[in-house]
Image (cartoon, helix red, strand yellow):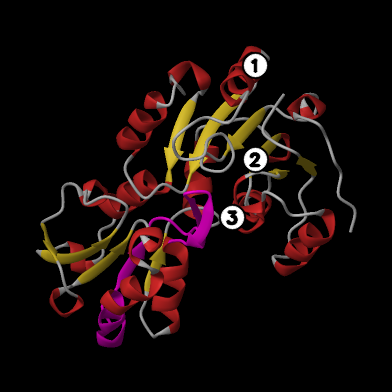
């Protein structure tokens, strides 16, 4: 298994017309842009490349864009910003499942208490699994409360057969410089316990369908998914017919080539190239 190492995105300039670029772990650490990331985004656009920021953020797009702007990643850095929470909202509004066509009591798991991903529906937030008609898994607070505490709140709903929606499939998240179980890990456990989960976000198709709709006429083979997750950013891009650039930051920071090959085999995914970081 050969890893094609490149120093930056300039090596892909002749092969790419557009980039689907991950956020957390790729261009920022959740609070601060990585060195050179903003300049790289602007350089890509100046070179005529289309730049779509594609995130597994479980919130709506407006929240995500506001958060990016607060870091200095302003609208001139990208052509569009698309996140799993926004795609979930659009899909659910277009074809609401039965439990959202009536008043629905929602148990939310997220980094903050906002339920904007269910804006326009008749919902009532609840605090316990016993009250819930729906479990919404938009984020993880495992770094704050511990995984076991979160799962103990969620497990009774799975046992009751309460449906769940996951708008952030990331199984790992970085917080405080450490890896913790992400929303995707909670959703996987929910599914394993017999609950049903509807997934939105990378690597699932809905978010790529929405992203590719923003790039009409661009051959998929000339679109690169860029990110730090083989399981989400690279596998999702490849499944959509695009190509992949893995950056060695975020959740794979510190992995050597041997460990990286193990991960590639684990997820049956081979990126077209690997770069040390997001840089031109």
Q: Which residues are magenta?
A: 154-182
As for residue 28 lying within the magenta part, the answer is no
Residue 197 located left or right of residue 266: left
Looking at the image, which residue is at 31% across and 33% down?
A: 62
Q: Earlier in the sequence, mark 1 or mark 3?
A: 1
Q: Measured along the vertical axis of the image, is residue 245 above or below residue 133?
A: above
Q: Position of residue 82 (x, y in %)?
A: 44, 38
Which label was assigned to residue 226?
2
Vertical position of residue 89 compared to residue 186: above or below = above
Say which residue label 1 marks. Answer: 43
Looking at the image, residue 148 lies above or below residue 262: below
Give the percent coordinates (x, y) of residue 211. Answer: 51, 39
Mark 2–mark 3 Cα distance, whole angstroms, equals 10 Å
Secondary structure of the residue carrying numbered label 1: helix
3D distance between C-alphas at marks 2 and 1: 15 Å
Q: Locate the N terminus by quadrant.
A: bottom right
Q: From the viewer's side, name the closer residue of 6 and 30.
A: 30
């Amino acid at each position: 298994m050969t890893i094609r190492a490149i120093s930056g995105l300039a090596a892909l300039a002749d092969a790419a017309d557009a980039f689907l670029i991950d956020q957390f772990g790729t261009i920022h650490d959740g609070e601060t842009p990585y060195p050179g990331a903003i300049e790289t985004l602007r350089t890509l656009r100046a070179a005529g490349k289309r730049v779509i920021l594609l995130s597994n953020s479980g919130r709506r797009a407006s929240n995500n864009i506001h958060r990016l702007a607060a870091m200095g990643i302003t609208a001139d850095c990208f052509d569009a910003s698309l996140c799993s929470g926004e795609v979930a909202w659009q899909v659910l509004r277009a074809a609401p499942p039965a439990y959202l066509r009536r008043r629905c009591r929602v148990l939310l798991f997220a980094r903050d208490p906002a339920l904007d991903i269910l804006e326009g529906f008749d919902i009532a937030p609840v605090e316990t699994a016993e009250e819930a008609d729906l479990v919404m898994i938009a984020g993880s607070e495992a770094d704050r409360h511990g995984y076991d505490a979160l799962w103990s709140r969620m497990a009774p709903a799975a046992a009751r057969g309460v449906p769940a929606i996951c708008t952030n499939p990331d199984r790992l998240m970085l917080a405080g410089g450490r890896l913790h179980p992400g929303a995707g890990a909670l959703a996987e456990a929910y599914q394993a316990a017999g609950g049903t989960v509807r997934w939105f976000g990378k690597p699932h198709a809905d978010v790529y369908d929405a992203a590719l709709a923003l790039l009409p006429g661009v051959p998929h083979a000339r679109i690169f998914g860029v990110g730090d997750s083989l399981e989400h950013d690279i596998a999702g891009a490849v499944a959509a017919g695009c190509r992949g650039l893995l950056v060695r930051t975020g959740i794979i920071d510190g992995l050597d080539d041997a460990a990286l090959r193990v991960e590639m085999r684990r997820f049956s995914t081979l990126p077209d190239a690997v770069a040390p970081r997001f840089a031109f």
